[in-house]
Image (cartoon, helix red, strand yellow):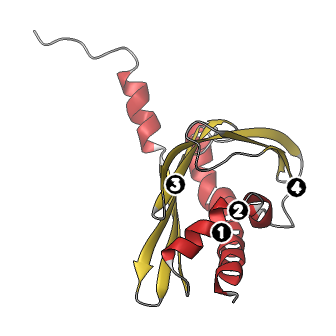
């Protein structure tokens, strides 16, 4: 007789089915080192918060320090207060850094900032693996509520990064 799977095995399978991925990629006419240097600026995160976002940075994090945490308070859809704690978990200059949500509005969130050489400079790619809140209801709503918000926010972030990196 084969051993029984853990009681929560089915739940873990369901959770993994809710995982989603968002990717935003842009070519920036600057070296990978310059693109990475932008992200290391003390005020980089403030520059990357779109003006339409109701977000307050309570605590900054140094991307070069594994384990450092950023704390952001914001209002989801402009009305629901949320506190987001993100921890830096990987740092590989000038190629990549990563943060994960410790607590916040998503069931899970992992954000990899990847910078690669490109014939015209560098490719900046943000890869986000996330699990929306509210289980399958969140997964059903994500294409209408989460994805458009991410598309708009990361278009803004990439444009801000491009302008800084391509300035002489």
Q: Nearer the viewer, mark 3 or mark 1?
A: 1
Q: CA distance from mark 2 to mark 1?
A: 5 Å
Residue under circle 1? 38
Q: Which residue occupies 58% across, 36% down?
A: 67
Could you tell me residue 108's position as x and y percent?
A: 56, 40
What is the x, y in percent for residue 62? 66, 48
Q: Name the residue carrying label 3.
A: 97
Name the residue that disc number 4 marks: 54
Residue depicted at x 88% and y 55%: 54
Q: Which mark is residue 5?
A: none
Q: CA distance from mark 4 to mark 2?
A: 22 Å
Dot 4: what SS? loop
CA–CA distance in space, label 3 to label 1: 13 Å
Q: Foreground mark, 4 or 2?
A: 2
Q: CA distance from mark 4 to mark 3?
A: 25 Å
Closer to us: 159 or 131: 159
Q: Does 132 sit above or below residue 142?
A: above
Q: What secondary structure is marked by label 2?
A: loop
Q: Quadrant of the C terminus?
A: bottom right
Identify the residue under disc 2.
41
Label 4 or label 1, whichever lies nearer to me, is 1
């Amino acid at each position: 007789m084969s051993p029984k799977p853990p009681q929560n095995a089915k739940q873990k399978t369901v959770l993994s089915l809710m995982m989603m991925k968002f990717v935003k990629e842009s070519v920036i006419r600057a070296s990978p080192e310059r693109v990475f240097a932008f992200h290391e600026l003390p005020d980089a995160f403030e520059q990357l918060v779109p003006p339409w976002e109701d977000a307050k940075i309570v605590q900054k994090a140094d991307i070069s320090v594994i384990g450092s945490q950023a704390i952001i308070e914001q209002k989801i859809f402009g009305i629901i207060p949320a506190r987001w704690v993100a921890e830096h978990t990987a740092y590989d200059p000038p190629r990549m850094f990563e943060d994960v949500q410790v607590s916040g509005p998503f069931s899970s969130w992992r954000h990899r900032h990847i910078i690669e050489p490109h014939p015209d400079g560098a490719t900046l790619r943000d890869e986000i693996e996330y699990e929306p809140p509210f289980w399958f209801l969140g997964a059903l709503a994500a294409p209408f509520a989460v994805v458009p918000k991410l598309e708009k926010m990361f278009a803004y972030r990439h444009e801000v990064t491009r302008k800084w990196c391509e300035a002489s």
